[in-house]
Amino acid sequence: MSAKKAFLPEPAVVQPLAVDMRRLTRVGARPRFLDYLVQLWDFREFIYYDARARVQSGTRRDRLGSAWLLLNPIFNGLTYYAIFGILLQTSGGIKNYVGYLVIGIFVFQGTSGAITSGARSIHSNKSMVEAFNFPRATLPIGMNIREIMANVPLILGMLLIIVLIPPVEKITWLWLMIIPALLLQSVFNLGVGLILARIISRIHDTTHLIPFFMRAWMYGSAIFYSYDRFITHPTILAIVKMNPLFNVIDILRNCLLYAQPPTWQSWATLAVWALGALLAGLLFFWQGEESYGRG
Amino acid sequence: MVAAEQVLEVEGHPCVVVDGAAMEYRVVTTDSDAAAQERRDTSLLKRFGRRPNTVVVRALYELSLVAERGESVGIIGRNGSGKSTLMKLISGQVRPTSGAVFASSTPIMLGVNAALMPDLSGHQNVVLGCLAMGMSRREVDDKFPSIVELCGLEDSIYLPMKSYSSGMASRLRFAIAASIDPEILLVDEALNTGDAQFGNRSKRRMDQLRGQAGCVFLVSHSLETITNMCSRVIWLDKGHLIMDGDPSDTVRAYQDFTGHLAKGNNLSAARVRDEARAALQTTQILARSKMHRSRR
């Protein structure tokens, strides 16, 4: 390379040009944070259309189509029920184990799906990123909205299982409280997805770690066992209670199965996690805005 | 290299200012000698965390230019000369490793490589692409008939894009990108796609866009297109600027160069290139008002 350069003669003249730069902006420059948020709002139609189109095309290759959205967690639930409920008997002492298990699995799958697809959104939409100049955070946001849309039938299916499979639970006004809990969960998913999306776009190796991380998280969220039976160490118990996902699951179980209003501590922990993750995610993602089109 | 004695003032507000932009990529190589050389040249600490066996490829050496309103600039050069890299830098798709590119509004790249979503239908891709360029849903719906007309896909527009032939797909991409009326338009080989019928339609749309646009950059291997459409031509070779000036002069020199290469006369080809380079007048950008380069 350097040999070639030496052969090429230097240009004859360097002409300095004075240019009025006042009306020019640097192309692809990252806007200030608040401007960035405004831009995201301006692209809301793009986000919404992107999400909706993906929900429709997501399972089109399968003969049963969207039914897989529901069948998948049901099969998962049956597997866990067979292993943990029947073989290992972790269900001891849990009232309505089927409902307990179903809520845990459906909620966990919601988060793991949303975080994984949010994290991969930049990578899997490379063609869009290279073709058009739009605020990149629209992609993880669109992915998360897609997950919310896909989750609505899932949650309805979950409620149906709870109502139909004995022991049958009564529907109370507490059932409405699952809506804010699920919304906070989605906000949290988005925040984590934004953080991971930037890390993956820089260091692609991280994608290999996400499944392990998710599995560890699943075992730490008391999905198929009762946390107060298996966790006796006070510090570990405190950590489990800080787990945002555990709080979502706990709120849902209290509302749907045990007709007990969730504690304010659960709400507070969840809200802090959700808003904290969103803010941290947006800031972190925004800082890398100019790097996503590259390499 | 001699510096010119007097500073020239650029009148008014230029559309695009490329200020010493250079681009290098770090890529994996299978050439073990090159990788070994690279290992010797960099310290262990620097190499840590990098993928193994990578080398730096300099796609574009430092380049400065000013494009004013009303100019259409053609870019010519062999494969791998840095034409597409320069276009990517101007469009803001890629950030230069050093230097910066300034523009008076967001440049729109009209290319055939704007791959879209294969699972979605052509119709959905049109809407998505237009929304991604910042149009509102209503504008998209207004423009939809003209986009379908331009790409000539008719009813196939409602089929998934993965069922399209490559010609159909690139026609659709062109039609989407051409639906917006940009001030700064970048065209990368877009005219060479599709059959003769589409060729005519796309040429008409291109002429229309060039008429409206303040400034056009055009990359094409068709020298005829370049001479017909451009008011200024830039010749790049292996990432270096060789010539910048009148279309017919530059194209003639380039044709001379490739003609020698085709006959296998590499030395005379190099002589043509070096002569052109030795006569080159490059630019150095001085900001008249305070330049707001962002922090790096």
Image: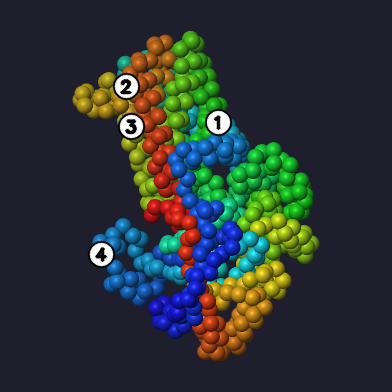
Q: Judge by depth and name the residue closer to the eye, B201 or B243.
A: B243
Q: Does B89 sit above or below residue B281?
A: above
Chain of the residue that carries numbered disc 2 in the rendered image: A
Q: Does B151 sit above or below residue A67?
A: below
Element type where label 3 sits in the image: helix
**Residue A272 place in picture, x, y as percent:** 36, 26
Q: Which residue is mark 3?
A: A219
Q: Which residue is mark 2?
A: A226
2 vs 1, front mark? 1
**Residue A6 place in picture, x, y as percent:** 41, 82
Same chain for labels 3 and 4? Say yes or no: no
Q: Is residue A189 left or right of residue B196?
A: left
Residue B282, numbered circle? none
4 vs 1, front mark? 4
Crowd rating for badge 2 (residues with CA inside 10 Å; few <14, some 14–19, many 20+): some
Q: CA distance from mark 3 to mark 4?
A: 40 Å
Element type where label 4 sits in the image: helix
Residue A149, numbered circle? 1
Q: CA distance from mark 4 to mark 1?
A: 49 Å
Q: CA distance from mark 2 to mark 3?
A: 11 Å
Q: Which residue is mark 4?
A: B44
**Residue B56 place in picture, x, y as percent:** 40, 68
First in sequence, mark 2 or 3: give its number: 3
